[in-house]
Image (tube, coloured by chain):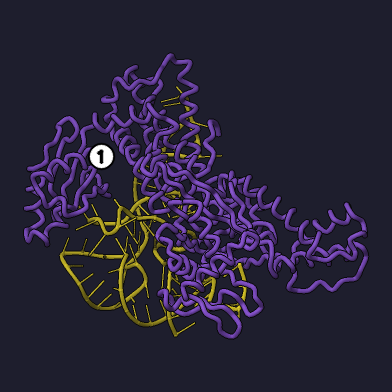
RNA sequence: GCGCCCGUAGCUCAAUUGGAUAGAGCAACAGCCUUCUAAGCUGUAGGUUAGUGGUUCGAUUCCACUCGGGCGUACCA
């Protein structure tokens, strides 16, 4: 419907040149009595043309060459909105479009030929993924799906560091537990990893090696085994959510491949770094940021900024048109430095899109549960999946905007899992599937011959909702907002459930039944496609 | 102190990116199953959009300040 309006506005702009001065958009009014689509063009042009908006609206209206088979009415309303009403026949055409495509319906080619990288999760292998990581994981993967739907070739990437202090502590935590298993009395430090999983890893080593590892360095087999086991578990958890990364990028490789040195040399060459107090500083104050920051410590070890910059350089060298980074809000202070560094090296930092999601507050019976991997005071993502299922986890993290400080009550989540909106969508899908099974015995086939019979309020409302899908996918991808898909699907499912209640298929007059069946099948396709983007299953039965 | 994010119905959150009368789910109340799945539908109730000012035809949305919360503010990542 929007497409058609854009067409006739384009034609009209040949006569009314000022239409080219503004971005023409069409909104869906909240109130049905304000038409199917509405333009605010006249209001936007009022100042520039020094004419009352309603006068301009009339000018625009009279210059539009409309097809009466598609548009039934145009009216000027309120302060100067132009409201368009479509004919039921035109509205029902969408069914043909959907049925001719089904599983591919909603995809667009707008970004075909472009490569995107989505980096997400990126937790270091020091412990199991927590509920907190869940939001990052789900949003990242869903975003990757969305980008694929609008044509991008997407790589999912996981960046991690298995060197450094944290990992040393991890290795020694395992060693201490191992020594404990050998019967030694240990004094397990408070700032070591307290989790049960450390003991499990120690047990495996004990089983395989007995007491032979007594003199081993904690940074050797203890650390290596811990990393291996924990990564296995992380990947396993992600896979339960349907998430598979194509690339696991190890920060260490940046050192081995001399990427760090190269970037360092380039900063020096461009006179963007200097030495002070035996550390190397990056002149961020010259690059538009607050203050200079250390990139190599006095110890000779780089701070995270340097490898982060070098890492992004490798992404540029891998020719991505779009690089999405998904971080929790605890990283919100770090990325401006990285972007500034990239800019200084001559890279176009507008290709990097950093998405910061707010933390999930976990509560249990209203009490806030504080999470810390170190203290082993956390709910693992695995436990959550066990409790509510992968579909609910995915839907839950997708359904809210990433800027919301989401609240997650564990008790409520379990108790209300039956009433979670995800079931509402899945139920709609299952209901349609059930009808399709049923009509096989009724000698009824879907047909698009008589779609013009779909004229009731419920049918028209459902059809109009279907019209929005393609655009909604595109918009969600361009705005990097996965929750829009959830909001849309809930509206679509509501429109379907109403249709289901008031418009029977089996038992209706044959031509009408065929048209309604076609509409139901089209609806099922869109629900399924939407759920696919979200990574949620679309059951045939419930 | 400074920076980023947030504050919307009892609770969890939307709001077409500045649009017309701020909407859903849950919870509450009242109805609807001999007919395609009642995990559904219909209706009622629930609001000074934290507050004050500003910008304009029009503000939940943009700006300033105040209050309240989260995360940062490292030669930790």
Provide the letter of the chain coloured purple: A
Secondary structure under the numbered disc 1 in the rendered image: helix
Which residue sits at x=51%, y=68%? A266
Q: Is residue A283 left or right of residue A231?
A: left
The total of numbered circles placed on residues is 1
Name the spot of residue A187 as percent of width and height, x first.
Answer: 84, 74
Q: Is residue A292 above or below residue A400?
A: below
Nearest the camera: A393 or A244?
Answer: A244
Image quadrant in which the C terminus of chain A is located: top right
Which residue sits at x=42%, y=53%? A480
Name the spot of residue A339 as percent of width and height, x first.
Answer: 46, 66
Q: Looking at this rendering, what residue extends furthest in the top direction?
A: A443
Q: Is residue A469 visible?
A: no
Nearest the camera: A131 or A189?
Answer: A189
Provide the letter of the chain coloured yellow: B
Residue pointed to by mark 1: A3
Dot 1 alpha-carbon crowd within 10 angstroms: few under 14, some 14 to 19, many 20 or more: few
Q: Looking at this rendering, what residue extends furthest in the front direction?
A: A269
């Amino acid at each position: 419907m929007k497409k058609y309006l854009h067409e006739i506005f384009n034609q009209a702009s040949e006569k009314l040149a000022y239409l080219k001065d503004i971005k023409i958009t069409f909104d869906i009014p909240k109130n049905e009595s304000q038409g199917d689509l509405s333009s605010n063009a006249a209001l936007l042009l009022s100042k520039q043309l020094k004419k009352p908006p309603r006068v301009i609206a009339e000018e625009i209206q009279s210059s539009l060459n409309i097809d009466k088979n598609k548009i039934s009415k145009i009216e000027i309303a309120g302060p100067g909105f132009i409201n368009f009403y479509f004919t039921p026949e035109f509205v029902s055409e969408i069914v043909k479009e959907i049925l001719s495509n089904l599983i591919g319906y909603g995809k667009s080619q707008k970004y075909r030929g472009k490569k995107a990288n989505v980096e997400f999760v990126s937790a270091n292998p020091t412990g199991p993924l927590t509920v907190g990581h869940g939001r990052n994981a789900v949003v990242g993967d869903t975003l990757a799906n969305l980008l694929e739907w609008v044509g991008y070739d997407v790589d999912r990437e996981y960046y991690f560091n298995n060197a450094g202090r944290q990992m040393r502590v991890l290795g020694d935590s395992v060693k201490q537990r191992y020594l404990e298993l050998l019967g030694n009395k240990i004094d397990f430090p408070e700032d070591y990893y307290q989790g049960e999983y450390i003991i499990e890893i120690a047990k495996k080593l004990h089983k395989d090696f007995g007491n032979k590892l007594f003199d081993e360095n904690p940074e050797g087999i203890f650390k290596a085994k811990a990393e291996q086991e924990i990564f296995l578990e992380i990947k396993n958890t992600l896979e339960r959510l349907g998430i598979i990364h194509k690339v696991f990028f190890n920060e260490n490789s940046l050192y081995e491949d001399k990427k760090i040195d190269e970037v360092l040399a380039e900063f020096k060459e461009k006179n963007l770094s200097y030495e002070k107090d035996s550390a190397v500083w990056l002149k961020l104050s010259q690059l538009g940021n607050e203050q200079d920051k250390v990139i190599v410590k006095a110890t000779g070890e780089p701070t995270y900024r340097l490898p982060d910059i070098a890492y992004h350089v490798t992404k540029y060298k891998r020719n991505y048109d779009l690089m999405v980074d998904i971080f929790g809000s605890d990283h919100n202070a770090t990325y401006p430095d990285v972007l500034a560094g990239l800019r200084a090296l001559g890279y176009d930092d507008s290709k990097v899109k950093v998405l910061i999601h707010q933390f999930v507050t976990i509560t249990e019976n209203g009490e806030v549960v504080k999470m810390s991997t170190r203290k082993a005071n956390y709910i693992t993502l695995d436990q959550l999946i066990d409790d509510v299922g992968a579909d609910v986890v995915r839907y839950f993290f997708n359904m809210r905007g990433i800027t919301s400080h989401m609240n997650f009550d564990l008790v409520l989540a379990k108790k209300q899992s039956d009433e979670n909106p995800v079931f509402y969508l899945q139920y709609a899908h299952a209901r349609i599937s059930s009808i399709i099974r049923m009509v096989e015995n009724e000698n009824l086939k879907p047909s698009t011959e008589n779609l013009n019979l779909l004229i009731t309020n419920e049918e028209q409302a459902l059809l109009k909702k279907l019209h929005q899908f393609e655009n909604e996918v595109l918009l969600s991808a361009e705005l990097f907002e996965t929750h829009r898909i959830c909001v849309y699907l809930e509206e679509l499912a509501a429109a379907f459930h109403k249709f289901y209640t008031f418009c029977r298929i089996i038992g209706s007059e044959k031509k009408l039944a065929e048209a309604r069946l076609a509409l139901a099948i089209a609806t099922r396709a869109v629900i399924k496609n939407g759920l696919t983007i979200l990574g949620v299953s679309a059951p045939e039965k419930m």
